[in-house]
Image: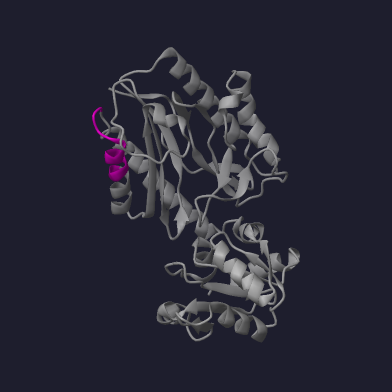
Amino acid sequence: MNEVRIRAVCAQIKAAGLDGLLVCPSEELLFLTGFTPMMCERFQGLFISAGGTCFYVCNTIYLGELARAYGKDMKIYPWLDGESMTGAVRAALEEHGLAGGRLGLNSTAQAFNVMDIAGACGIEFANALPVLEEARMIKTPGELESLRKAAVIADDMFTKALGYIRPGMTEADIRRFLLAGMGEAGGDKCWAIVACGPNTSYPHYHGDSRAVQEKDVVLLDFGCAVDGLYSDMSRTLFIGGASDEERKIYDIILRANLAGEKAAVHGAFIPDVDAAARDIIASAGYGDAFINRLGHGIGYMIHEGPDIKKNNRRTLEPGMVFSVEPGIYIEGEVGMRIEDIVVVTQGGNEILNRSPKEMIILK
């Protein structure tokens, strides 16, 4: 258990007017306790009261592993297959004075379990995403160092990819290359999106079967974790040449990326940061094709707070870490983006990704 992080979360629980928090297996549980087990349909989760008391409810198949991970200081309430899960939860909540209370939920709590617990235990559940995000939004010096190391692995992998990608190979071939290379370099939880041709028009493309062709655009979006903290970068490549329209779009995105990063400094109003990049794309006539927020926070999850978007009305503070990733996506035709991770510092910011951003045409 990380007592410092638990205390930080408890402060946010009280500020949100909650009696406690339920955190099911996830990166959020890993952040708070240093361990997260496998999750299946059987309910399990960590309960944290506003006063800082922690206890865990799980099926017996997880009991031994959790007891070893959390030690004797964590009280665990097990339940057997064939017994009442809600009975075990109700007994635990009553013992700790939380029955009938208002509890926040993390991002992985399963709706069918939550509904059963609410009905059987008189619990009112609330969205606790802001509670958990606020508690980890400002990164520590140690966390920032891990983020830097993860970014270096991604940057190095991009350099290697430039010598690997060629016509005829599939998106799956490139994805496997990226994942294997980041793993060999010490990255954990490696991930990658690879899209080519018209598939680049889908920002979170989920296929992998298309083969790279001459004059294709190739979009790479990938990263890994170091000490549980993620990297995330995107670069757009061109195979054998680029049309005048593609060159125009790429130049717009590059200018938007640089403007967004220049604006993302200590004290900046987040809607102004979004606008710094978005206005460039809109003034060039592609405003309707910039369909996503400018950026997302990153840390123990690839997507966490703060979101860099026009309705997040807060200012940037030192230790906040997020992406700046303007893009233009013309459905069924082409998509491009350039993405870096930015750390807000006392004097401005630090760009973690060092990979080149000028147009790269692979011969």
Figure check: 16 above or below 177: below
Q: Position of residue 104 (x, y in %)?
A: 66, 65
Residue 244 lies in quadrant: top left
For this view, does 178 lie left or right of residue 290? left
| Residue 107 in view here | yes
Q: Is residue 152 left or right of residue 316?
A: left
Q: Which of 347 and 119 is in front in this view?
A: 119
User: Residue lying farthest top?
Assistant: 244
Instruction: Please determine whether, in this image, residue 98 is positioned above or below residue 105.
Output: below
Give whichever of 344, 237 is nearer the camera.
237
x and y percentages locating residue 271 in the rendered image: 69, 37
Depicted 310 relative to depicted 278: above or below: below
Q: Is the magenta stretch mostly helix, strand or loop?
A: helix
Stretch of the chain drawn in magenta:
167-177
Residue displayed at 63% across by 79% down: 53
From the top left corner, tell me how far across and down residue 21 is, in percent.
Answer: 64, 69
Does the rendering let one see residue 2? no
361 magenta-colored:
no
| Pick the front one: 137 or 16 | 16
Q: Residue at x 41, y 47 (%)?
A: 223
Asked whether 20 or 302 is in front, the reply is 20
Q: Say left or right for 107 vs 269.
A: left
Kindly indicate the quadrant of the structure image that contains residue 45: bottom right
- x, y percent for residue 154: 39, 44
**Is 168 included in the stretch rendered in magenta?**
yes
